[in-house]
Amino acid sequence: MQTLIAPVVNLVILIGVMAYYLKQPLKAFAKDRHVSIRTELDTVRDQLRNAKAKHAEFSSKLRAMDAEIAGLKTQALQDAQALKTKVQAEAQRLSGNIIEDAKHAAVVLYAEFKVQLYSELGGHVLDRAEKILRERLTGDDRARIRKEFSNQVETMQ
């Protein structure tokens, strides 16, 4: 036990000397640490308060945006429906115009075709009549036709 007394006494002296000389620096350190922790705690509280305020602000803005988006969606649907109605009405009007134009074009083409058909038919009839007359006319018939034609020309003069 004697061997332990000297180290214990040395330890007590060391602790006493350290306590005497380190008391002020430890107090200052503890005080500074306390102040810095309090300052940081106040800063964190302010940041937390600001964060909560910003969170509330952004949450209200998000709710307002949701309402605005819903309104825009409703407006877009209404605009789309109105545009659809307008496009359908315009399409019906244009289809009516197209039908009228087609009818008019058909009438014009029919008239042109009819004139062309009559013209071609008349030409074919004359050609056929000429062919038949050439085949069936005799010399006497020709002389008689010339005589009748001459008489008609003379009476007209």
Image: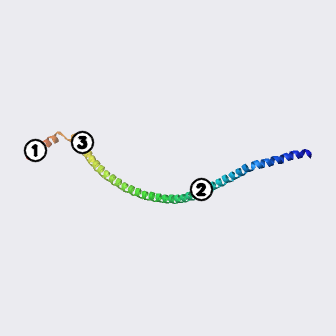
Residue at the spot 16% in from the left edge and 42% down from the top edge: 141
User: In the shown orientation, is residue 43 left or right of residue 139?
Assistant: right
Q: Residue 39's quadrant in the figure?
A: bottom right
Q: Earlier in the sequence, mark 3 or mark 2?
A: 2
Nearest to the eye among marks 1 and 2: give it: 2
Picture coordinates of residue 144 (x, y %)? 14, 43
Helix or strand or loop: what does disc 3 sit on? helix
Q: Amino acid at mark 2?
A: Ala
User: In the shown orientation, is residue 116 left or right of residue 47?
Assistant: left
C-alpha gap between disc 3 and disc 2: 106 Å
Picture coordinates of residue 62 (x, y %)? 54, 57
Most foreground residue, 96 or 121: 96
Q: Earlier in the sequence, mark 1 or mark 2?
A: 2
Helix or strand or loop: what does disc 1 sit on? helix
C-alpha gap between disc 1 and disc 2: 122 Å
Q: Which residue is mark 3?
A: 127
Q: Earlier in the sequence, mark 1 or mark 3?
A: 3
Q: Amino acid at mark 1?
A: Val
Q: Residues within 10 Å of mark 3 (few under 14, many from 20)?
A: few
Q: Which residue is mark 2?
A: 51
Residue at the spot 28% in from the left edge and 48% down from the top edge: 112
Helix or strand or loop: what does disc 2 sit on? helix
Residue at the spot 61% in from the left edge and 56% down from the top edge: 46
Picture coordinates of residue 75 (x, y %)? 46, 59
Q: Residue 120's quadrant in the figure?
A: top left
Give the answer, above or below, for where 92 lies relative to 3: below
Question: Is the C-beta separation of discs 1 and 3 under 8 Å?
Answer: no
C-alpha gap between disc 1 and disc 3: 25 Å
Q: Which residue is mark 1?
A: 153
